[in-house]
Amino acid sequence: MTTTADTTPDSAPDSTADATASTADPAVGTAADTAGPGAAPAGRALTGLLRPYRVGLAAVLVLQTVSALGGLVPMIAVVELGRALLRQGPVDEAHVWAAVALGAAGLLGRVLFGALASGIGHLIDGELQFSVRRLLAEHLGRVPLGWYARRNSGELNQVVQGDVADLHPLTAHTPGEIASAVAVPLACLVYLFLVDWRLTLVTLVPVLLGLALNLMLMSDGRRRDQLALDGAMGRIAGSAVEFVEGIAVVKAFGASGRAHRAFLKAADDFADYFLAWVRGVAALGALASLVLSPPFVLVVVLTGGAALITTDAMPPADLLPFLLLGLALTAPVAALGHGLDDVQAARRAADRIQGLLRVPPLPEPARPVTPSGHRVELRDVAFSYEPGYEVLRGIDLVLEPGTVTALVGPSGGGKSTLAQLLPRFFDPTRGTVSLGGVDLREVAPKDLYRLVSFVLQDVRLLRASVADNIALAVPRAGREDVVRAARLARIHDRILELPRGYDSVIGEDAAFSGGEAQRISIARALLADAPVLVLDEATAFADPRTEQDVRRALDSLRENRTQLVIAHRLETVAEADTVVVLEDGVVSESGAPAELLATDGRFAAMWEAQQTWPDNPPQDPGTVTKGGGNR
């Protein structure tokens, strides 16, 4: 490790500076907080999601319109039959059979066109949900890791799962409801006006009242209440996920009461929002349902019809169309209220989806540069999770090929954050991290992850076979190579104990302890064979013998490989070439282990403190020599 003083910051290309500025706060942006100046207005996000499917949706709308009109034809046929049979004089048989044939044709058309529209709508819905989820997955794969650490997992799940699912009615059901709500009343009105325009106006009274009440329910104030309700529901989901994920720790420390109270508070908040929302819509909703209900429509039509019939202004037989088709006027309007609710829910969901897609990703270089070698250099590096507080500042380090650099220091000093800069989980807010003389921001991600491998303390294994988990970075690796890596990581024998060995699927017939999962992750890194290896407490859960075996495996790969190791047990870094003591985000000491012990500084004090622990027999610090370990 050496400090650097030769390359100036001005030598970084403009694109690097722009990239640094764009990721100064990698935690920025959520589905809620990314809205602001330049954000898409409400509704535009939904239009953007649906634009690729506009031709198919137009076809669905046309087919649903034809289907809705086809469903109206049998009712008109019944009306015509009734009028023909109730008229005085001989029955017009041709008219009767024509009405029967027309009704049967309309019914058949409704079934055929409705089925076709429904099929196309559901196909569009499947493609839309697939494409949106794929888009979210691709975008989230480019979002800085620090963004996830500062997000509520329940709210994120609500966007990826719940909000995408909320788009379903918009393509599969709402077009039919809208088509019925428009086409059926218009067709009914034309027919009823031809029968009697005066009673038609009377029949329109419930329709107009229902429309007015539904528009009031869709006011801006109601939408804001619904947004607050959605936010409260998201907090419930987040509290539930966090409670389930942390239940073991919660119970172990007797804090289940506090955890329950946190969840119950979120539930109580939701209940308060829900009750306030219900109080706001209950009266209007009940009134809208009343004026559009069949009994109310029949009372209005019968009242108006009786007035016309008793004054000889209309023959009694002409009342029949209004009794039947009056209901056809209001039923689509009532359904339209539910359809508009679905549209509003879809708009809110689309806004949150677009908000998530607006989270700034780590920028990729327009003209990638290939590193020359694998010398790692950090120059004047600073990093902040949030403005105003730097987790790292003024870091100058050089990691030479073929060496092991150990990061030690108190918890919270910034060790893991620094290590995560090498695989570019974050970009520094100031300074540069370079590999082979090239700023990491100028290296294509696919090239970077072939050059830098990492093993973190918090291991995540995929729900896939053990072999596939080990070969994650090298999917074409042969079984022999996978087994060799597992042997080096001292996990091979444990894998053979599984029901199907390397073909056992994690989460189905394979389960690993924390230490075993770490060794799977180490085998994954060994198989990747990247020239730069980052180990963050990679053997934290291993017993001393296993840890020693794994360290020997890593030492066998030491030649011409750049290693950065984080460890709290100082004896595990005794064989490092360089020890860097990181405290409060700055380097307080650096040098060979023996040199640092001889200076009687911070590292020596930490070493002495650990040697006095009950589980550590006293050792002579003077027996630790550079590159030689405990001799």
Image: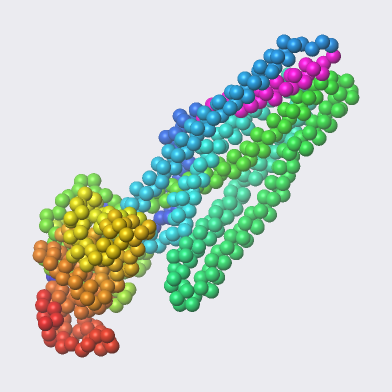
Identify the image quadrant of residue 130: top left
Asked if residue 125 lies left or right of residue 288, the reply is left
- Residue 528: x, y in percent? 20, 57
Q: In which quarter of the image is the N terminus?
A: bottom left
Residue 48 seen in render: no
- Residue 574: x, y in percent? 17, 78
Question: Is 480 included in the stretch rendered in magenta?
Answer: no
Question: Is 80 included in the stretch rendered in magenta?
Answer: yes
Depth check: 425 or 521 in front?
521
Identify the image quadrant of residue 5: bottom left
> At 23% across and 73% down in the image, what residue appears?
546
- Residue 560: x, y in percent? 10, 63
Residue 267 seen in render: yes
Magenta stretch: give its range.
60-88
Asked if residue 591 lies left or right of residue 85, the reply is left
How many labels sit on residues?
Answer: 0
Q: Is residue 138 above or below residue 197?
A: below
Q: In which quarter of the image is the C terminus?
A: bottom left
Asked if residue 623 lies left or right of residue 139, the reply is left
Identify the image quadrant of residue 505: bottom left
Depth check: 10 or 545 in front?
545
Determine the main secondary structure of the stretch shown in magenta. Answer: helix
> At 54% across and 70% down in the image, what residue appears?
260
> At 72% across and 38% down in the image, what residue appears?
292
> At 39% across and 48% down in the image, what residue appears?
136
- Residue 518: x, y in percent? 28, 66
Asked if residue 584 lies left or right of residue 225, the reply is left
